[in-house]
Amino acid sequence: MKAEQDSDLLEEDPPQDNVRTNKYSSISPPASPEDQDNALSTTYFEERVPIPENIDQVFSFRKLWAFTGPGFLMSIAYLDPGNIESDLQSGAKAGFKLLWVLLGATIIGLLLQRLAARLGVVTGMHLAEVCNRQYPTVPRIILWLMVELAIIGSDMQEVIGCAIALNLLSVGRIPLWGGVLITITDTFVFLFLDKYGLRKLEAFFGLLITIMALSFGYEYVLVKPDQGEVLKGMFVPYCAGCGQVQLLQAVGIVGAVIMPHNIYLHSALVKSREIDRKNKKEVKEANKYYFIESTIALFVSFLINVFVVAVFAQAFYGKTNVQVNEECNATGSPHTDLFPLNNHTLEVDIYKGGVVLGCFFGPAALYIWAIGILAAGQSSTMTGTYSGQFVMEGFLNLRWSRFARVLLTRSIAITPTLLVAIFQDVQHLTGMNDFLNVLQSMQLPFALIPILTFTSLTSIMNDFANGMVWKISGGVMILVVCAINMYFVVSYVTALNSTLLYVFAALLSVAYLCFVAYLGWYCLVALGVSCLDFGSRVSKQPAVLIEEQSELDS
């Protein structure tokens, strides 16, 4: 399809040179179709998938297959090692009682991913590019730094997961620090896969998701959870006998499932299909099929998460350290010393999770668990790298090679992880996940607020801007998610019991809340609260489609 057909929404008047668009102006694409193609070719977009034409059915499996790919790549963030650890801890601490929280968080995630996909489809630009054009310079740089922090934090969790999986698979022969170093090289190898074609790359990610489903599904069949309790926990929003521990775990589930950089990622991945943005019907159709595909992808990821929660709920909920120690000792496990001889409730992480499965259900359960964790770590590492490159290119207009981008983010992520792996034990390594979850929770407003802001503006989205129901429900949803995650952050900080850290956190909170308030004000004006739109008046005239600009150019 011609490049002209894949252009973005434009202003009614051609933008003048050296004049930056105001904060609510329409989106301007690259200067020419050739520039657009060059921009697309730098990351993930060497080719674009054609969509079957002349199919008039309301629903077509051929078209759904053509649109299948971006949603499954996006869903990998719902299956990263941080999510898997949150799942197993949920099962061990609360049994089946928090499955409804996992379901609710996944549904909220789906609705947020819908906004991200619509932004990319309608404008032809991803969220970082839109932020670059709409926010002033200083907020834009701060926003970029916050998103980069989230990506680096996620990358560290994935490195930790891969290192632990390799250690378990090698029966300790590969030390944790060795596993950390191995993740440097394997990521570069996998990134060369996209040279073989976009659909082959997406198929490889599908293979990794299948490995996770088979691995954790095997554990589910082996443990045989009570199906009635699974359904009850999933659809009855109540947690009988739950206390502070279970409350914090519920909050942690929401923070682990909804990840900020994933919003940026999905808005970019949807640009990989050939869509004529001059044709309103094609845009509407693309939005429909992307939503269906995302629903299927997140349903698969939800099932995999349920497998993990149910396994640990059935087998280890209410177990004490001494019970696990005795079982591991009886089976001759070399990891018996991980579980002290006391009656404290068992606490598990990715590493201990594999060990206890091996103690109770045999070595095969341990190795298959490790294979699933390795697949989770590898797949999320690769999508995290794409997120980083999209964000850097969008916010800074920097066109780095994949090699340079991976080298930068992976170096930043590996350095602290490697130091902990060398000088501390596995408990300290997995303990880093708590801090990293807090770090990512703090970054959520920097993805959720911008995506609601820009999808609500007719100057950007034209006829596809959010309606009043979506504006209100989206605003409430984002407010609830951010409030839940702030509770998680405050609980973590107060548990540190350090006056110096309290003072530092208080000072940091002031700056943080000021910036969130700025983004919130910006969003409220976009949602139609005109009384807050003081200062320069904004233009909210709908953007026009590319054919009008083409007529001007001709």
Image (spheres, rainbow, N blue to C red):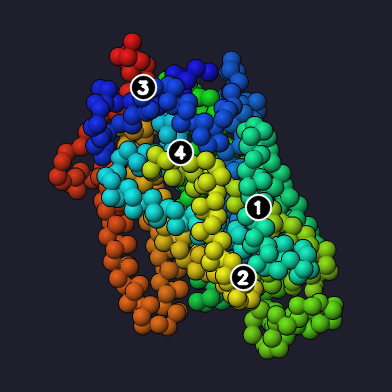
Disc on res. 185: 1
Which one is closest to the eye, mark 2 or mark 3?
2
Identify the amino acid type marked 1: Thr
Picture residue at 65% right of the left edge, 67% below the top: 177
Which of the two discs, 1 and 3, labels the residue nearer the N terminus?
1
Q: Residue 133 appears at what percent x and percent y?
A: 32, 38
Picture residue at 84% right of the left edge, 69% below the top: 362
Q: Residues within 10 Å of mark 1 (few under 14, many from 20)?
A: few
Give the left or right position of residue 414, taking residue 510 as reference. Answer: right
**SS of the residue at dot 2?**
helix
Identify the amino acid type marked 3: Leu
Q: Residue 403 appears at what percent x and percent y?
A: 56, 45
Query: What residue sits right under mark 4 in the picture?
Result: 399
**SS of the residue at dot 1?**
helix
The answer for how far apart the CA atoms under marks 3 and 4 are is 28 Å
Identify the amino acid type marked 4: Arg
Identify the amino acid type marked 2: Ala
Which one is closest to the eye, mark 3 or mark 4?
4
Query: What residue sits right under mark 3 in the picture?
Result: 545
The answer for how far apart the CA atoms under marks 2 and 4 are is 33 Å
The answer for how far apart the CA atoms under marks 1 and 4 are is 22 Å
Q: Residue 6 appears at what percent x and percent y?
A: 46, 23
